[in-house]
Image: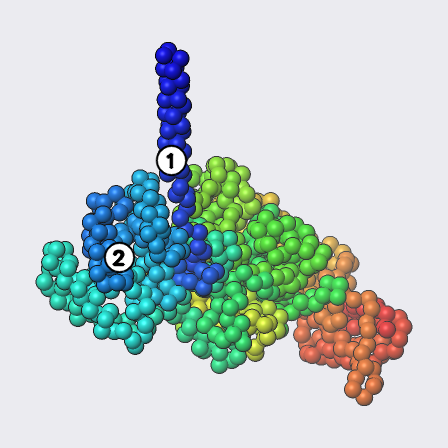
Amino acid sequence: MKKGLLIHLKYYLLNNKLKAILVLVIVAAYAFCLPNKLFNDPTSTILESRDGDLLGALIADDGQWRFPILDAVPPKFAQCITHFEDAHFYKHPGFNPISMFKALNANIKAGKVVRGGSTITQQVIRLSRKNQSRSYFEKVIEIILATRLELRDSKEQILNTYVSNAPYGGNVVGLEAASWRYFNIAPHKLSWGQSALLAVLPNAPSLLYPGKNVEPLIEKRNRLLKKLLESKVIDEITYQLSIEENIPSKPEKLPQIGPHLLQNIVKTQKGKRVKSSIDTYLQELALQIVDRHHNLQAENGVNNMAVLILDVKSKKVLSYIGNTKTTKAHQKDVNIILAPRSTGSVLKPFLYMAMLDAGDLLPETLIADVPTTIGDYKPENFTLKYLGAVSAKEALAKSLNIPAVRMLKSFGVTRFYDILRKLDLSDINKGADHYGLSVILGGSESNLWDICNAYSNLAGTLNHFNENSSQYYTNEYQKSGFSSDSKTDLGAFNFDKEIFNAGSIYFGFEAMKELNRPGIDNSWRYFESAQEIAWKTGTSFGNRDAWSVGVTSNYVVGVWVGNADGEGRPGMTGVSAAAPVMFDLFDVLPKSEWFLTPLDDVIEAKICTNSGQLASDICPFTVKQVPAKGLDTDLCQYHKLVYLNKDQTHRVNASCERLGDMVKSSHFVLPPLMAWYYKRNNSDYKYLPPLKDGCEGEETPVMAFTEPLNTNTIIIPKGITGERNKIVFKIAHTNPEAQIYWYLDDTFLKSTQNFNEIAIGLTSGFHRVTALDENGRSIIKKFNVK
């Protein structure tokens, strides 16, 4: 008896243990039966503005317009979809037994499926299981998974999942895609009539087809609107207005006002919703401006244009237009903003600022602007004219090439290359020797993105110096961001600059502000409403690239104009083609105040009125503000203290004049070649009086060769007839009316006056050309002819 009881107890415990295990297995199966992610379908890449407007979208990899899941279902649509699909959605546990019983009864009576009893939750499950064949077994699975989903997600999450993955006809999936494709508006802007129409579509997505099924679709929509009226969700007026709304006749094209930025974003954020920093209103205005100027430029065979607008203070992109709305043949899909192009003159301000920062020059320092040959490199000004001598500030404002090359030669190509690398001009990466002196005139390539970011960082440095008690940030130089949510880490405060001192940047922008604006804009100074803009243009060799970049304390606007295939067009320059676009863009931006003077990095100094260098004791001077490093520059080298006779017509000294009869005088004296061209542009320039006959001492040079320059070897090409061409020799004389006598070796050739040049036929070998003036002063040029 006792033994039997023990056996019975043993079996009882074993049986209960098995039941407990079974229950645990069932509970575990139920707990883990629902996948963590119900939908793994690819989604469209969505680009939104900073205000949430749709700027563009790319279709998903499976060919469907399927937007990433919504943040929330719009209230109007939530009312419509629940009233139509599942009136008890917010009450049931995932399935509705009453609805299922009614559907089963109706289907049995009809002998076919005429009514569905699925809840929205069950439909989510069915969609996630890819609409498997309907059966009672499948329905049981749906119910189990639906109840599990209800335990995991909130009702709002479930509804959002459903409307984001439901079919809306054709290749349109989800409410947001449907809203844009059928009504070209965001879901939260849908009217009651539009919301009702889209609410009935997942139930019968094939109904919405252009030109077909209009009446059945209207009838379904109106029944839903009637139901909303009866439920007092909408009033009678709303109902009447809603049933009068038209049905879309065809799918709309999605907005595409930022296609090139979208293509750039899809490389790293494919299938995601990206909220950018783009200002929709500004982007649309910029597109209109680009279209207008593109139509004008197209008449000259110029087909492409790019625009970038940056916010200096937030380091965000406000407008991004990678190309014009041109044709595929003209490479409309190329993103010019990121394309390396010849820089023309847009790098010149960086050199100017670098030399100010290094204490190598002052804004008014004179730079030679004369015919120049350095090795095999012979730069020319755009005007093919020479000023003789020009201030560094004016040379930048007039974008003169020869002074820029001479400045770079003085500063050093390697030093300047290192500056460009620090400014993060990524395409200039082949080493200083690869580019040489031509880097300053377009001998290198960069892109609009890097150029605009460099100027933006310089403007930001100047702003922050003035805002932060004359301190810099340690991480000032960085790229602007596309995303509205990204944060900019400028690092800590530092009294040490990162690249340029604030004073150098300020005087650089001051010089850029003086450029003559194109057309009627050149009179901007006379209008109170006009704003000060530091700007620089660039034109590459062969008129292939036209640049214009403008800077204010708040914005950087960059424009590139040209042909994507590199074809140059006559007359296409930065001033004529790109600058007008840039100024039109600034006109639609809020006006910016000019940069504050960085007082702690600026100092007053006595500046020579003529040379622009630090004044010596014999210079007439003006007190001006200069960068603090300006005190490291040289004293004036062009003023000389000389002694003249009483009439001040000749120079004299103690060897030929009594001390009491000598007059001490300070003279501004340029080297002969500079003086000759300078005099032609500055009639008040006075040559140094000649040395009086009979006086001992060195005579000041009065002549200089202007052609050919700086060469010991002359290669003579052959002409069309096969004969060797003659070589032209030119000299500049301080006295334009001087008689010049020309000699080849020891043979007299001819004399000239006023136009002192001569064409000489040369044979191979070593030769010398001598030019002798009427006073016996001479210059000699020796060379080897090949």
In the image, 132: left or right of 263?
left
Q: For mark 1, give the secondary structure.
A: helix
Nearest the viewer among 185 and 206 is: 206
* Residue ID at (60%, 44%): 632
In the rendered structure, find residue 26 and report the number of the disc placed on it: 1
When the figure is inspected, residue 197 is found, relative to residue 2, above or below; the finding is below
Expressed as whole percent of the image width and height from the top left, the position of residue 440 reads 62, 60
Residue 69 in the image: state x and y as whole percent: 36, 52
Q: Locate the C terminus by quadrant.
A: bottom right
Position of 749 relative to 118 (above/below): below
Q: Amino acid at mark 2?
A: Gly
Q: What amino acid type is highlighted by mark number 1?
A: Ile
Please indicate whether residue 296 sits to the left or right of residue 777 in the image: left
Q: How is the image coloured?
A: rainbow
Query: Picture coordinates of residue 538 (x, y %)?
Result: 55, 66
Q: Is residue 345 left or right of residue 748?
A: left
Q: Residues within 10 Å of mark 1 (few under 14, many from 20)?
A: few
Asked if 544 appears above or below 225 in the picture, the reply is: below
Q: State the mark number for residue 162.
A: none
Q: Residue at x 40, y 17 (%)?
A: 7
Q: Nearer the viewer, residue 444 or 599?
A: 444
Between discs 2 and 1, the one toward the N terminus: 1
Q: Quadrant of the N terminus?
A: top left
Look at the picture and state if 86 lies above or below 286. above
Q: Residues within 10 Å of mark 2 (few under 14, many from 20)?
A: some
Q: Position of residue 16 (x, y in %)?
A: 36, 25
Residue at the (51%, 62%) spot, across then down: 337
As helix, strand or loop, the secondary structure at mark 2 comes to loop
* Foreground of the two, 284 or 429: 284
Residue 116's label in the rendered image is 2
**Quadrant of the image occupied by residue 371:** bottom right
Residue extending furthest toward the bottom: 721
